[in-house]
Amino acid sequence: MRPFVSSFVHEYENDEYTVPEREVPALWHHDGLEDTIHSYPFPRNISDFDRSGDLIVGEEPKTDAVNFNRLPRFGFTGLATTQEWLYAGSWNGIYEINKSNFQLNRILSHRLMNDIHGIWTDGEIIISTLPGKDAVVFTDMHGKIVDHFSIDSKLNVYKNDSLMEYDWRFLSKQYRGSTGKFHFNYLQKRDNEIWLTSRNLCCFVVVDTEQMTAKLRTISYKTPAEIHDGVWHDDGYVYLTSVDGKVFRVGSAEEVPYTPFDDVDVAYLFDRDLYPSKIRLEQTEFGREPNWCRGISLENEQIFLNVDGRYGTRHYSVIEVDWEGTLHNSRKLDWKMVGNEHEIRYMTGFDLLLV
């Protein structure tokens, strides 16, 4: 199978599980032949930050920050890369990892990092989100806050200075499900635009960083979808995962061919923005609907996905399929490679990069 790195998150059955003072599994590297699980430290509370010394750069905890009442999930979320470094999001930091040996170099952390999802970097700036506050955050390569903005329900883009009053790193998730009005997941910058996927709206929120305006880019689904992650491909389309095992290929309605049902004389009279075509994994050679699907990378015509790993399973997989439904490869990661499989509540792939 093509070499890849897959970030994953996991949580334990015991709500009061205490992380031992050791590194925790978070990254799966497949080199084309063998699999290696890489582990990293996950400082949670102020005392953990104090013990980490020079490993954490950016901002020290606020003096009034509080310890977690309940620990959030462990592991890595969004991934981004430069020529030398792999960057991985966590609950309260962004990890800078050497791509040649997967050794941790630094953890970038400041008060506006909480429940990080997708991240983007050009090697000079890192863009992440604060999902529970519908905020986009710009961080320099030394872990300092450069700027931030928020988006309200009327799509106003504004500076919410009240965010700085709290150290969000030490706040656990308060309830199940999505946080924020939009719950931003996938994030990518293209020219002067930042494209964000909204889990709650199942569409894009696109921010013009020069005009500081936001707009919706809606998608004309024919079936329900729960989009999470996506990637621009060199064919000009955005490919998106839906957690129920669909992959959408999205483009401008003017550029995507009509289906026979759309090939009518007056289709042009109706408004439509982005138009999707899709595959269902249950209708490919994979043969079933996975219980989770997120993280996506493409190479030529091949689509690489993280699937499964939610409650009631004992593994998750990276699979390689094409748009015609052929399953080319599959690689499984058993929970027992990470820890005691009977103590883990779930372990799901979050993001995926080809290396």
Image (cartoon, rainbow, N blue to C red):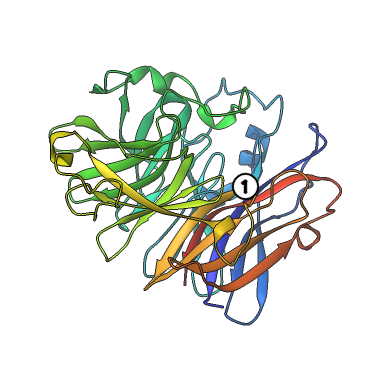
In the image, is residue 99 above or below residue 121?
below
In this view, the residue farthest toward the bottom is 33
Residue at the spot 34% in from the left edge and 40% down from the top edge: 196
Residue at the spot 76% in from the left edge and 51% down from the top edge: 313
The tally of labels here is 1
Q: Where does the image place residue 11, in percent across and percent down from the top left? A: 72, 42
Q: Residues within 10 Å of mark 1 (few under 14, many from 20)?
A: some
Seen from the viewer's position, the closer of residues 353 and 115 is: 353
Q: Which residue is mark 1?
A: 52
Seen from the viewer's position, the closer of residues 147 and 246 is: 246
Residue at the spot 23% in from the left edge and 39% down from the top edge: 273
Q: Amino acid at mark 1?
A: Ser
Seen from the viewer's position, the closer of residues 59 and 303 is: 303
In this view, the residue farthest toward the front is 265
Q: Is residue 74 visible?
A: yes
Q: Secondary structure at mark 1?
A: loop
Q: Is 288 left, or right, of 179 in this rendering?
A: right
Q: Where does the image place residue 45, in percent across and percent down from the top left? A: 65, 34
Q: Where does the image place residue 285, in percent across and percent down from the top left? A: 58, 67
In the image, is residue 122 above or below residue 58?
below
Residue at the spot 50% in from the left edge and 60% down from the top edge: 352
Q: Is residue 95 visible?
A: no
In the image, is residue 31 above or below residue 41?
below
Which of the 4 image quarters holds residue 31? Answer: bottom right
Q: Where does the image place residue 133, in percent across and percent down from the top left? A: 43, 24
Which of the 4 image quarters holds residue 197? Answer: top left
